[in-house]
Each structure stands twice: as structure tokens, then as C-alpha cells.
Amino acid sequence: TSGNYRRYIESTKNNHLIDPKQQQSQQNFASITLFSHGTNSDIDAYATAASVMTVEKAIVFLKGLDIGYILMTNSAQRFVSDNLTRFVERP
């Protein structure tokens, strides 16, 4: 999970996820949670990359990978991948 809700400087508007094109803190996502059978370092990199994209670009990017996702925007929208049950087991 990557998000802008804990790591910031002085206010949540200055979070640690920096959009390299804008050279500013990203403001699209409150949280991105990824599910995979892959390595943690890859998933962390994917979450960070997706966090600085627009919602639409992030969804296209994540759909191209073999992962599940839950995206929470700063405006309280939630996006859940169709394949999430492949990665999550219920007790």
C-alpha cells in the first residue's frame, strides 16, 4: 500500500509521493493497494509509479500487469480490479 495519508511535510498537501513531471506532491490518490504473487519490491515500485498518474492512466497501467488493486482517490472514489479474488483468500 502506498498513500499520502501519513508521510508529508507540514501538511497533507506536501506528501512524499512526488509527480516528476509536475515536480509537486501528487494529489490524485489517498491510497493504492496492490495484490500480487510477485516480489514486494516490484509491487512497491508499481504502486509508487501509479500514484503519480491520473486515475485513468493508473488503471490502464495496472490492468497491464498481473496484479489486483484497490485505488482510493482523494475525492473518496474507490476502484477495485476485477481479478482481486485471484490474490485474496477468504477464511
Image (spheres, rainbow, N blue to C red):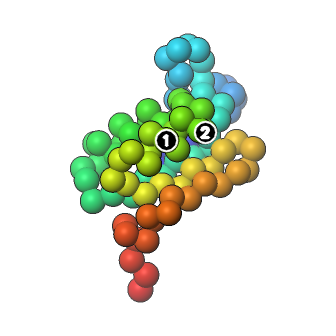
Kindly identify the residue that appears in the image at 36 percent across and 37 percent down. 45
Task: Give the structural element (helix, strand or loop) at label 2.
Answer: helix
The residue under label 2 is 55
- Rendering coords of residue 57 (x, y %): 54, 35
N-terminal label among 1 and 2: 2
Residue 10 seen in the figure = yes
Kindly identify the residue that appears in the image at 75 percent across and 44 percent down. 75
Residue 4 seen in the figure = no
The residue under label 1 is 60
Near mark 2 (Cα within 10 A), the count class, few <14, some 14-19 or many ≥20, is some
In this orientation, which residue lies closer to the viewer: 57 or 69? 57
- Rendering coords of residue 35 (x, y %): 39, 58
Identify which amino acid the numbered label 1 is placed on. Answer: Val
- Rendering coords of residue 36 (x, y %): 33, 57
Residue 13 is tagged as none
Task: Give the structural element (helix, strand or loop) at label 1.
Answer: helix
Q: Is residue 70 above or below residue 27?
A: below
Kindly identify the residue that appears in the image at 62 percent across and 50 percent down. 72
Identify which amino acid the numbered label 2 is placed on. Answer: Val
Asked if marks 1 and 2 touch (Cβ < 8 Å), the reply is: no
Which residue of the protein is positioned furthest toward the right in this rendering?
A: 75
Q: Nearer the viewer, mark 1 or mark 2?
A: 1
In this orientation, which residue lies closer to the viewer: 59 or 91? 59
Quadrant hosting residue 64: top left
In whole angstroms, how far apart are the C-alphas of marks 1 and 2?
9 Å
Using residue 61 as the reference point, say whether residue 43 is left or right of it: left
Kindly identify the residue that appears in the image at 51 percent across and 58 percent down. 81
Using residue 44 as the reference point, say whether residue 82 is left or right of it: right
Q: Which quadrant of the rendered structure holds the C terminus?
A: bottom left
